[in-house]
Image (cartoon, grey):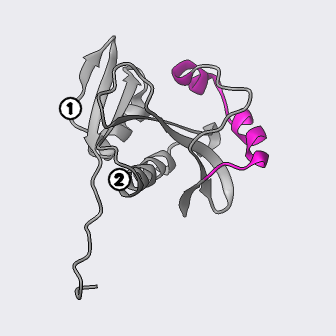
Amino acid sequence: MVTIRSPRDGDVAALIAGRDDDSRRFLGEGSADPRPTAVIEVDGEVVGWVDYDVDREWLLPGEVNIGYNVFPRHRGNGFATRAVELLLRRLAGRTEYTTATLLIDTSNVRSLALAHRIGCDDPVDFGGNQYFKRALRRPPTSTPGLG
C-alpha cells in the first residue's frame, strides 16, 4: 500500500541516500537537509518523496508546482503516480489551490507518462521542457441527510 506522510527527522538520511544520477539530472543536487511536503511509504518503508511549491515565477494565482522522486530500486511500480494522486487529493481538500502544474524534461519518459496517467492536459513547450496542468478536483460536499 502506498501512503504519503509528513517527513520525520529520521527520514533525512533515506531521502539523501535515495538520490542517483537520474534524480540529480532532472531535479538538481538537492538540499543537505531535505524537507519535502511528504515522504512516500510502501509497507512502512520510505521509497521517495512528493512535494509542491508556489514560488515559481511562471505560476498563476491558485497554481502549485509538483515535484517528486522515487528511489531507484522502487521505480516502475506506480509509486510516484499514486503518491502524486494522494498529494493532489490532499491539496484539493485542504487548500484553496485550483491547479497543479508539472514542468518535465522532454527526456524524462517516466515523468511524461505519469503526467498523462494523472490526467494532465496536453503540454505546452516551456523552455524546451513540457509544461502540464491539471485542475485540482474538489471532493464533493455531503448533503445533509444523505450521509
Tell me: 106 left or right of 143.
Answer: right
CA distance separating discs 1 and 2? 21 Å
Where, quadrant-wise, is the C terminus in this rendering? bottom left
Q: Is residue 86 above or below residue 22?
A: below
Identity of the residue furthest to the top in this view: 127
**Residue 19 occupies quadrant:** top right
N-terminal of the pair, mark 1 or mark 2, is 2
* CB within 8 Å, label 1 to label 2: no
How would you classify the magenta stretch by its main secondary structure? helix
Q: Secondary structure at mark 2?
A: helix
Amino acid found under the numbered disc labelled 2: Ala
| Position of residue 125 measured from the top left corner of the image (x, y, whole percent) | 26, 17
Magenta stretch contains residue 21: yes
Based on the picture, tell me whether residue 7 belongs to the magenta stretch.
Answer: yes
What residue span does the magenta drawing correspond to?
6-27
Q: Does residue 88 appear left or right of residue 70 in this picture?
A: left
Near-viewer residue (98 or 112):
98
- Residue 77 visible (yes or no): no
> Which of these two is toward me, 61 or 139?
61
Q: Which mark is residue 140?
A: none
Residue receiving disc 2:
92
Name the foreground residue: 23 vs 131: 131
Residue 46 left/right relative to 120: right
Instruction: Name the image quarter holding the N terminus.
Output: bottom right
Q: In the image, which disc is placed on residue 122? A: 1
Q: Residue 136's x, y, as percent?
A: 29, 48
How many C-alpha atoms fall within 10 Å of the one at disc 2: few (<14), some, or many (≥20)? some
Amino acid type for the residue under numbered disc 1: Asp
